[in-house]
Image (tube, helix red, strand yellow):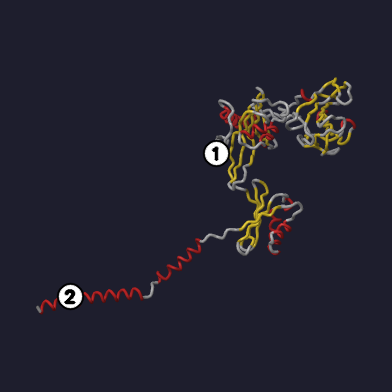
Amino acid sequence: MKSTKASTAAAVAAILAVVAIGAALLGYAVHSPPSPERLAAPAQRDQNAEEAAPAPELVAESLRIRRGDTLEVLLKRARVPLDDRLEIIDSVRRAFDVRKFRAGTYLVVKREPPAGTVELLEYTIDPDHCLRVRRDSGSFSASIEEIPGVVRTVAVCGILEGSLFESIAATGERPELALAMAEIFAWDIDFYTDPRRGDDFCLLVEKKEYFNGQPPTYKRILAARYNNAGALYEGFLYPDPDGKPRYYSRDGRSLQAAFLRSPLKFSARISSHFSRHRFHPILKIYRPHLGTDYAAPRGTPVQAIASGRVTFAGWSGGAGRMVKIRHANGFETRYLHLSRIFVRRGQRVSQGQRIGLVGATGLATGPHLDFRILKHGKYLNFERLRPPRARRLTARQMREFAPARDQYAALIQRRLAPGPVLASAGSALSPTAVD
């Protein structure tokens, strides 16, 4: 019995010893000083948290540029401190001509909250370029940067329904492409009178889409095709001997002729043709009408059909306000009944340059342009005149021109087969990848 009690007491004592040792170890763990690693961990976590914290978002203010505004005025309006203003103006002048700020556009000033310190200024120069002024290490520096994006070649094809503007818009593209097409074929097609419902057309155009979401813009038109009531017109882009891009037919003839097909661009009907015996609506007598009358709204722009020198610009009796231009090879053109004149005598004008506006001055029953052309003093019927082309590609140039021409033509044909379809955007910079 005594032996049993002794063994039990020994077992209890052993258990108490183990508990005491465990408590001592626990106390040491709780009260002992932390290791260097444990001390460093919270500090490291705090440092990482600071590094991961995003920079405060800049607050942007858009300043509308008014007529007569200077950069100094704009910065004052934005409450930019004097020292910063002087430094910004100095840096901008080294990178950009501040006189090119356009009224109606915006200068964007970006500040760091809450103090309002100016960190960045931005001004969009054109769709492809932006002026940026940055604060870096306490000082400002200005630079002109390209607005990033991707250029894709797209085919814009369709059928004429209504006007060319409306038909281009129906493809999902902007109507400005109609003007570009009219300029390409301006020497062959009079887009006032020649287009017919059901004509088909197709353009291969470079279209830049911007990463910042701004509207896309059109760059070069690589090729164009217009089927005018069965008469097919084509133009393919190729640089001339001076490196200037021009359009050529499939056989290498320049689309540029000595004269444009019309002194106007769009939407005018011929109200009176060239005639040796026409009844005058005001004078009530029969007499020659040695020009072509284009009925157009007052204020419609009038363009010179060829380069030349202005020999007369002013009032001329029944002709009203008139412009005369002398051209090469004995040609002269006259533009009658203008409401306004934009050129002066002796001035050199280029083909397609705006020289005045349609009006009804002089003997006129309503707004129209009476256009006349002479050669060596003899009046010609402009509607029947087919002037020669400006140039033709040489054999060497044709060898360089042909591969691109064939590639563009194949792309257009692929889009038109089995018939004209609406365009969609391509997915590559090369014209070989057109949707």
Location of the C terminus by quadrant is: top right
Label 1 crowd (10 A; few <14 / some 14-19 / many >=20): some
| Residue 304: x %, y % from top left | 78, 33
* Among the two numbered marks 2 and 1 on one chain, the one whose residue lies closer to the N terminus: 2
Kind of residue at disc 2: Ala
| Residue 24: x %, y % from top left | 29, 76
Residue 256: quarter of image: top right
Q: Is mark 1 on a helix, strand or loop?
A: loop
Kind of residue at disc 1: Ser
Instruction: Give me the C-alpha separation between circle 2 and circle 1.
Output: 86 Å
Query: Which residue is label 1 attached to?
Result: 427
| Residue 280: x %, y % from top left | 86, 24
In the image: residue 349, left or right of residue 416: right
| Residue 69 disc label | none
| Residue 85: x %, y % from top left | 70, 61
Query: Which residue is label 2 attached to?
Result: 11
Residue 342: quarter of image: top right
In the image: residue 171, left or right of residue 276: left
Q: Which of 101 and 108 is in front in this view?
A: 108
Q: Mark 2 or mark 1: which is in front?
A: 2
Q: Give the residue furthest to the left.
A: 1
Label 2 crowd (10 A; few <14 / some 14-19 / many >=20): few
Image vertical order of residue 165 relative to residue 88, above or below: above
Q: What element carries label 2?
A: helix
Residue 197: quarter of image: top right
Q: In the rendered image, is residue 306 in sight?
A: no
Location of the N terminus by quadrant is: bottom left
What is the tally of numbered marks visible in this picture? 2
Residue at coordinates 10% horizontally, 79% vertically from top-left?
A: 2
Q: In the rendered image, is residue 275 in sight?
A: yes
In the image: residue 397, left or right of residue 267: left
